[in-house]
Image (cartoon, rainbow, N blue to C red):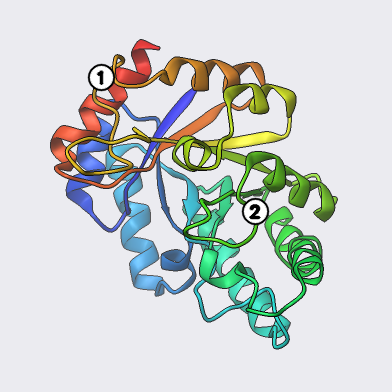
Amino acid sequence: MRFGVCCGIDNEERVKIAVECGYDYIECGFQMFANATEEQLAEWEGREKKYGILCESTNCFLPNSHKVTGENVDYDALKEFVARGMKNSARMGVKTVVFGSSGARNIPDGFSYAKGFSQMGYFLREIAAPEAEKYGITIVTEPLQKAESNMINTVKEGVMLAVLADKNNVRGLADLFHMEQCGDTSEDIRLLNGLIHHAHISNPVGRDGRKRIYPSSVDEFDYKAFIDALKEGGCERCSVEADVIDFSIDAPQAIKVLRSL
């Protein structure tokens, strides 16, 4: 399995640390690429070549201003943003785009849940997937804890959305932190064999009052059950996504834990 870490290509110090401690790739922000200038893209391409690592996946897909549910969805603006972002992301080596974006997808108060879910499917099927397909990019639907999102909270719901989109390059994602918050288990991943394309990992129970922190020990959580289920289900890429305390300490500890599994 390939392991990556969420770390912007614009932060050269963190990129250097990620390479030195053995990550296979980094995961950056889609919006950052979509809004980048030519000068920035050229600089970041040079950084990838310098350190021999690519941004194979992105998160933070849509800004809150680009709603995909509700009465006033601007599909022209969505298409323009997604097209620009996919083109720039492909240039940086991106293969997977994570669709979390709770602010863009949350259903407005009083709006039909069924219609909102249908709108999500339409956005993926008619706008996002076709643009991603031009560059060989897969979009993965990310379930989020209920405190963040009022729809798509479980791994099964995320896969249901991917199935609704009915596109070969739309699949599901499993995030250990959100799974722990929403009651998902590793067995749920196994039941969705072949439909989980990407994953996020962290210490989902935290310590010292902090939640969603970098893994630091194999004894603090049963990470192996999660990784084993991903491998059995055909998922070959997993990124560490957690709150940073000290990246120079956090990142090396986490990859050591993951490699030991």
Residue 125 shown left or right of residue 88 in the figure: right
Residue pushed farthest top?
260
Task: Please provide percent x and percent y for residue 30.
Answer: 48, 61
Q: Point out the tag, 1 or 2, that comes first from the N-terminus.
A: 2
Which label belongs to residue 152? 2
For residue 44, what is the image quadrant? bottom left
10 Å crowding of disc 2: few (<14), some (14-19), many (20+): many
Question: What residue is rendered at 73% in x and 34% in y?
Answer: 195
Q: In front of the other: label 1 or label 2?
A: 2
Residue 117 shown left or right of residue 154 in the figure: right
10 Å crowding of disc 1: few (<14), some (14-19), many (20+): some
In the rendered image, the quadrant that contains the C terminus is top left
Q: Identify the amino acid type marked 1.
A: Ser
Does residue 129 sit above or below 56 in this rendering? below
Question: Could you tell me how far apart the alpha carbons at marks 1 and 2 are, in whole angstroms?
Answer: 30 Å
For residue 213, what is the image quadrant? top left
Q: Can the viewer see residue 193 in this picture?
A: no
Task: Please provide percent x and percent y for residue 46.
Answer: 32, 53
Residue pushed farthest bottom?
72
Question: What residue is rendered at 31% in x and 19% in y?
Answer: 257
**What element does badge 1 sit on?**
loop
Q: Identify the amino acid type marked 2.
A: Ile
Q: How many marks?
A: 2
Q: Nearer the viewer, residue 162 or 40?
A: 162
To which residue does mark 1 refer? 217
Question: What residue is rendered at 52% in x and 31% in y?
Answer: 237
Does residue 135 sit above or below 63 in this rendering? above
Task: Please provide percent x and percent y for residue 95.
Answer: 58, 45
